[in-house]
Amino acid sequence: MKVLLVNPPLSFPDFIYSAIPLLLGQLKYNNIDADAIDMNVEFIKDITGKEHLIKTKQKVETLYKQRFSNNSSNNPKEQFLGQNKAIQNCLSQPKILNMIINNADSIYSNYMKMKNTKFDKKKAILMEFSLKFAFLPFSKIVSKLNYLENKAPYIIEKTQFSLNAIDLEKYCNDSSKNIYIDYFKEKIKEINANQYDIIAITIPFEANLYPSLTLGRILKEYTNAKVVFGGIIPTSVVDSFIKYPSWFGKYFDELLLGEGELSILQYVKYVEKNLPALEVSGLVYKKNGVILKNDIKFIKNIEEIKPPCYDRIDFNNYSSPVILLEFSKGCYWGRCIYCYSSAHKRYHIKNPIKAADMIEQLVQKYNIRNFNIFDDALSPNFLDKFSEELIKRNLKIHYVCFLRFENNLTFKLLNKFYKSGLDAVFFGLESASNKILKLIDKGINPEVAERIIKDCYKIGIKAHVGIIIDFPKETEKDLLETLNFIERNEKYIDLVDTFHFSILKSSNIKKCIEILNVKNILETEEFGAYLSFDKEETIKKKKLDKILKEYGIQISPIYSKW
């Protein structure tokens, strides 16, 4: 039995998505022959390379002749290329375009080298141009590379189709509009996909859905492997998948919901015929033409989760040579009414000494000393003991994590965390209005938050702060309390992430209805992770946009359909 784990396109290649090395670690520990491929980073490297850009140039020229040779428009080329002046200029100046193409194979590597140097706008522009140019023949798809304060790059794939079944099927099968079809056909030959019995694809974001469906269809057509989808999106929108029994066997064989560390091991046994389908946690499968869904079983002993495996990962491919870790399941607070954790109450966390053991093993194995601990929120008590272990072992690592603004995060404790290697913390402030904080049951105090942010600044810990605007029942006064908080503490905050209030399908929808008084919650897109809803308009949209503009607030991107 041989397994391949796949991370699909398209998101920014800052680091390998955590599910792949985590699941690879579980498989390897259980002596299962397994490989992993980051198809996301492979795709971005390949399409911005010389060979692909030459093919793109030829395709663009052919398409232009086909579509506009008899066009009476005054400027058909501009019509074809839209408002992308950079590409228009390059096509009208072949020498510049050829220079870019001839040096294309170094564009990605040079761009990634910026992780160790300061931001270089020229390298960024070349990378952005290469991406946009590569997507150009596929007129419905536009790839963008944007920058937040010249230091936080991200890629979004902007689609002009919905996440509904009709559109997804149409684009998954149309090679004139889908850049992935020809690419995946070549890639599965290159990696000899036929050698695998199981190919598991994780789908963490909405933007990964139609590339994953495309890849799944091609794998089903050209290999004999069992193709299984897992991750946040299948778990969140499973009811939509179930509505289309014909997709089972065409785009994938089964779905795996919930915590993959448990279900992937059970799935292997199921394919080996050593475990009945009914006993596989979160398995969604087709039997006699009917789709069946098993209940999700949660991991009872978090110590059973083994260290992630990065054996198949080339850290040079990423903007950050970082290892992602998770030490807990759930959130110790778990009461924020809009959050997934409040809908699924559970909390388990590793022993801090064993967590430090895991860090030490990974440092010794990979010689990587940068870690991103992405738990919902680490408790101060855990971090106190954990940092003590790190200091004692003198590992000299650097790590970031998520924390809550707790009153017991004293200057002394934060300084201890800093000495253990804590470089940056993401805090979910959400709002600085006591009314809103009470309404959403956030359980924090803005005054305490302000003190902690200033303490972090004095110590040398970078504070990243997340805020949510446009809450139901949020008045202009509430919003200004939050924005004034940010403005007042601008000197002490390293980065502000601003998000619109949204309701995930997997969140505590019942509480949102009862407490926030949202109404008419609807599914506007079958396979979208978010729901639409009506709420009392306490701030008019024009007024909201004006206020945000006055304060220089940008809405942060989500890896989603934008």
Image (cartoon, helix red, strand yellow):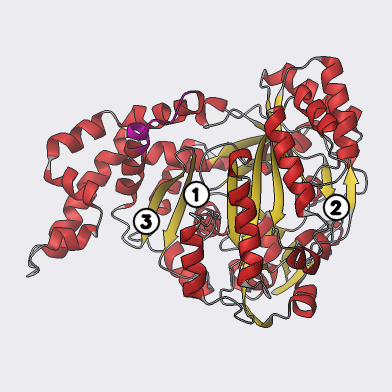
Which sits in the foreground, 137 or 189?
Answer: 137
| Residue 6 as seen in the image, left or right of residue 121 | right
Mark earlier in primary sequence (3, 2): 3
Estimate how packed mark 3 is, as few (under 14), some (14 to 19) or many (20 or more) residues with alpha carbons within 10 Å. some
Q: Which residue is mark 2?
A: 275
- Choose between 544 and 419: the one closer to the eye: 544
Left or right, 395 with reference to 105: right
Q: Position of residue 535 (x, y in %)?
A: 64, 80
Q: Residue at x 65, y 47 (%)?
A: 465
The residue labelled by disc 3 is 142
Q: Position of residue 145 (x, y in %)?
A: 41, 46
Q: Is residue 122 magenta?
A: yes
> Which residue lies at the image location 67% right of the left edge and 72% below the top edge?
242
SS class, disc 3: strand
x then y, percent, for residue 239: 69, 72
The span from disc 1 to disc 3 (Cα, nearest Å) is: 12 Å
For residue 326, which quarter of the picture?
top right
Query: Quarter of the image containing the N terminus?
Result: top right
Q: Earlier in the sequence, mark 1 or mark 2?
A: 1
**Type of amino acid at the residue the image marks with label 1:** Leu
Write the residue at 60% across / 29% down: 313
Residue 225 visible somewhere in the drawing: no
Q: N-terminal of the two: label 1 or label 3?
A: 1
Residue 10's label in the rendered image is 1
